[in-house]
Amino acid sequence: MHFRAPAIVCAALPHGEAAVVARLLTAEHGLVGAYVAGGRGRLLRPVLIPGNTVDAELRSRSDTQLPFARVELLQSRAPWLAEPLPAAAISWSTALAASVLPERQAFPALFEALSGLLQAVCVAPSARGWAMGLLRYEVLVLRELGYGARVARPPDGDWGALLEAFDRVGRELARYALADRRRDVMAARVLLRERLGRIGS
């Protein structure tokens, strides 16, 4: 394996004293786990924040070997991580991709959807500007994985109906895509739902 492509950081797990195993979502190669030397150091730690977009170069000697990655920051989401709602949305959407997508299987539509969602979270003046995009992203995850999701589009401007649809999709995710690990990952969604629920209708 040897390629270079834009990638969304979906997770970064400590490895050893200073390295990180990053889970990077790319358009053509799907979700790829990669070893990043110095990933916990002063220079790379702010780069490998879930939600960030990076220019990633990955190399491995065989398809079974964990690739080594070099990353450069293309777009940082760090300024929005200090805001409770955007931070919860970024954390959940990236954790979902990192948890349910199979390794090295391309999902270009999901890559584009997650890219668009992250951008919307960072530019919309409130959660009302991106909540529908988040719901569509979750439904797309279920459909791309073969589970399907029968969720009617809530009427525009009906915040209560949108939250009801959000709850229905959450049950589908917990029942199917996250059935084996919902306690760990769904906690991020529960936090997001609590914060969305505080927005008045």
Image: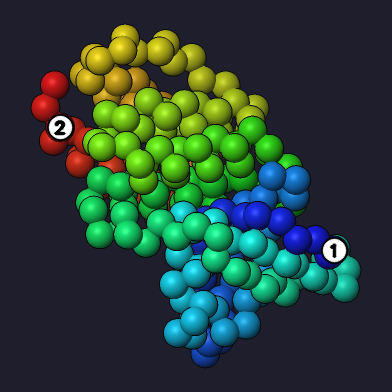
Query: What distance separates the C-alpha of mark 2 from that of mark 1?
Result: 46 Å
Residue under the image location 32 percent in, 59 percent down: 79
Check the image and report above or below for 119 versus 1: above
Residue under the image location 50 percent in, 69 percent down: 47
Circle 2 packing at 10 Å, graded few (<14), some (14-19), many (20+), is few
Name the spot of residue 25 as percent of width and height, x first.
Answer: 62, 52
Residue under the image location 50 percent in, 57 percent down: 75
Q: Nearer the viewer, residue 125 or 94?
A: 125
State which quarter of the image contains the N terminus: bottom right
Look at the numbered disc 2 and give the secondary structure of its residue: loop
Check the image and report above or below for 196 versus 181: above
Q: Nearer the viewer, residue 200 or 192?
A: 200
Name the quadrant containing residue 154.
top left
Q: Give the amino acid at mark 2.
A: Ile
Name the spot of residue 133 as percent of width and height, x first.
Answer: 42, 29
State which quarter of the image contains the C terminus: top left
**Is 16 situated left or right of 154 in this image?**
right
Is residue 41 among the parts visible in the rendering? yes
**Is 125 situated left or right of 111 in this image?**
left
Look at the numbered disc 1 and give the secondary structure of its residue: loop
Q: How is the image coloured?
A: rainbow
Name the spot of residue 62 as percent of width and height, x first.
Answer: 88, 68
Which residue position is annotated with label 1?
1
Q: Nearer the viewer, residue 167 or 44?
A: 44
Which disc number belongs to residue 199? 2
**Is 195 situated left or right of 166 in this image?**
left
Q: Give the amino acid at mark 1.
A: Met
Q: Residue lying farthest bottom?
A: 17
Circle 1 packing at 10 Å, graded few (<14), some (14-19), many (20+), is few
